[in-house]
Amino acid sequence: MNMTGKITSATNARVKRLISLRKKAKQRREEQVFLIEGERLFSDTPREYIREVYVTEEYLKDRPVADMPAGCTVVTEEIMRKVSDTETPQGVMCVAQMPSYQKEDLLGRGTGNKTPLLLILENIQDPGNLGTMMRTAEAAGVTGVLLSKDTVDLFNPKTVRATMSAIFRVPFLYTDDLTGAIRSLRDEYGMQVYAAHLSASIPYDEADCSGPCAFLIGNEGNGLTDEAADAASCRVHIPMEGQIESLNAAMAAGILMFEASRQRRHGGM
């Protein structure tokens, strides 16, 4: 294994850069890279996306040399704790290139012309929610995720961890004009866009999700804006008992996505 040296000083320029990449979305966007932490996520990261690897000496013990990519940099346990976003770092971190997609990728064109199933997110602010939605989207067979520009950064370390590496497998795209994108999906691609909304809506399991469709989920506290909801084809809600008025955004998105998955497995409603 080819090592590139050992960093022992917390004032090292590379250490400062790693901290900046952890904390600042702007830095990540400028470099088009982000941080991956921990054994599981590191192992799941496609090698072609890895740009730099940082490990501790403890992490290297009893690990086959062949498992490690060339060019690893050893850092002290103290430095790993300093650059890490977790309380108990696992001794490995890498800088990875951001995946990049086009609109056509979200429509399943690269997966054997799979029937499009999109998740559209407006102003989601909780990193954990966003990561969970990405992970659930992969499990439900979603072909792509469309995000409004004011949605939390997908490459936030907490979001990345919550995706469980789905960030490399589910196409996504941020848009400056969400309502325009929704209208385009409806008018140009013939998609049914279902807005999760409590007002003037039908039960979600009465919506036909067997054809090209998308689910629109709004902000955790405020829901969808009127503009986004009005651009959708139809409004749907999840019937609930008791005194609960709404579900967690990630939970609601999961129920809707898996309803589409169920209909497609069984050939319709």
Image (tube, rainbow, N blue to C red):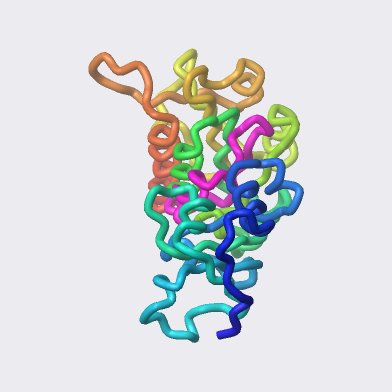
Say which quadrant the C terminus sits in: top left
Q: Is residue 157 magenta?
A: yes
Residue furthest to the left: 242
Q: Residue at point 75% right, 33% down?
A: 176
Q: Is residue 157 visible?
A: yes
Say which quadrant the N terminus sits in: bottom right
- Residue 194 in percent (x, y) is at 54, 30
Residue 4 in which image quadrant: bottom right
Against 160, residue 185 (above or below) is above
Of residues 24 and 175, the one drawn nearer to the viewer in this rendering? 24
- Residue 202 in percent (x, y) is at 44, 22
Q: Is residue 6 magenta?
A: no
Of residues 231 and 23, the one drawn nearer to the viewer in this rendering? 23
Please state the total of marks drawn on the protein image.
0
Of residues 266 and 193, the one drawn nearer to the viewer in this rendering? 193
- Residue 53 in percent (x, y) is at 58, 68
Q: Residue at point 35% right, 16% down?
A: 245
Against 229, residue 150 (above or below) is below
Residues shaded magenta: 139-165
Is residue 3 rendered to the left or right of residue 42?
Answer: right
Q: Residue at point 46% right, 57% down?
A: 78
- Residue 149 in percent (x, y) is at 68, 33
Q: Residue at point 55% right, 54% down?
A: 167
Residue 183 in which image quadrant: top right
Q: Is residue 109 visible?
A: no
